[in-house]
Amino acid sequence: MDWVAKHPFTTVLFLLIFATGIFTGTALGHKIPVSVQNTWGTGPQKILDGKWWTIFTMVFFCNDAFMLYGVILAGVPILALAESTLGTWVTMIAYWATQVIVWLVIAVIFHRLMVRGVAPGPDVYPMTDIGLSVGLFGVIGVLVVALNRSPGMAQHWQTIALEAGVPLYLVLKWILMPEWLADTGHWMALLLGIAAGLLFRV
């Protein structure tokens, strides 16, 4: 209970993600129904159509059990480290601000490409995306800056793991499992988090 008290944002976020996984069946090994993803996931076209709330609802859904448990195993330690290092409020603000800003920027880019005559569609742009990763990468960016500014806030290996492991993961994911929408959002969020950490001296 002491851990929960010290990490309320991490606890609530991942409990909701797991509860959503049970509700959709992904926690039990099923793939998320296409109708559910289309309803609660987000994408540039959906944002342009005014369904802004999907920027928030997408966070709680996962495609399948592999994604769900991978998100929990990787995300809980990272977000908990951020929350204990940056504080709950800073972590929450960094997460949701990054999530919203990056998706709005992606929507603008998408619109500009449409204006230039690049036809939208699943073959060009995935129409919906789900998962918590965009906001998480934004928090990682802020956290990396904070840990470099105050090295004693975490173990040295944790800083190295974030600085080397996260970019390596993003590169390998782009090579092995390329997703235009998700990969763009990940890199934008990480860089935005780093810029925010430097600007606000978190």
Image: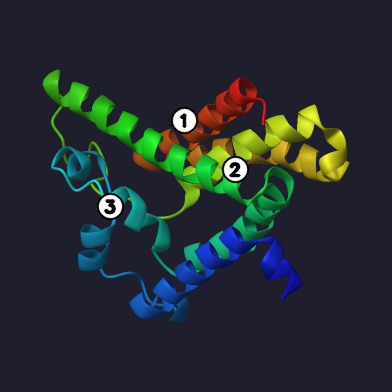
Q: Is residue 172 above or below residue 25?
A: above
> Upstream in the sequence, badge 3 or badge 1?
3
Q: Which residue is mark 2?
A: 90
Q: SS for tag 3?
A: helix
> Upstream in the sequence, badge 2 or badge 3?
3
Residue ID at (54%, 38%): 138
Q: Amino acid at mark 3?
A: Thr
Q: Is residue 122 above or below residue 15?
A: above
Residue 152 appears in the rendering: yes
Q: Is residue 144 above or below residue 17?
A: above
CA–CA distance in space, label 1 to label 2:
19 Å
Query: Picture coordinates of residue 98 (x, y %)?
Result: 46, 38
Find residue 188 and name its label: 1
Query: Picture coordinates of residue 167 (x, y %)?
Result: 62, 35
Circles 2 and 3 in contact, beta carbons < 8 Å: no
Colouring chosen for the image of the structure: rainbow
Q: Is residue 54 above or below residue 190?
A: below
Circles 3 and 1 in contact, beta carbons < 8 Å: no
Q: SS for tag 2?
A: helix
Q: Quadrant of residue 74?
A: bottom right
Residue ID at (46%, 67%): 17
Find residue 54 and name its label: 3
Residue ID at (82%, 32%): 150
CA–CA distance in space, label 2 to label 3:
23 Å
Circles 1 and 2 in contact, beta carbons < 8 Å: no
Closer to the camera in the image, 132 or 90: 90
Quadrant showing the N terminus: bottom right
Label 1 Cα crowd, 10 Å radius (few <14 / some 14-19 / many 20+): many
Residue 117 appears in the rendering: no
Quadrant showing the C terminus: top right
Closer to the camera in the image, 77 or 146: 146
Q: Amino acid at mark 2?
A: Val
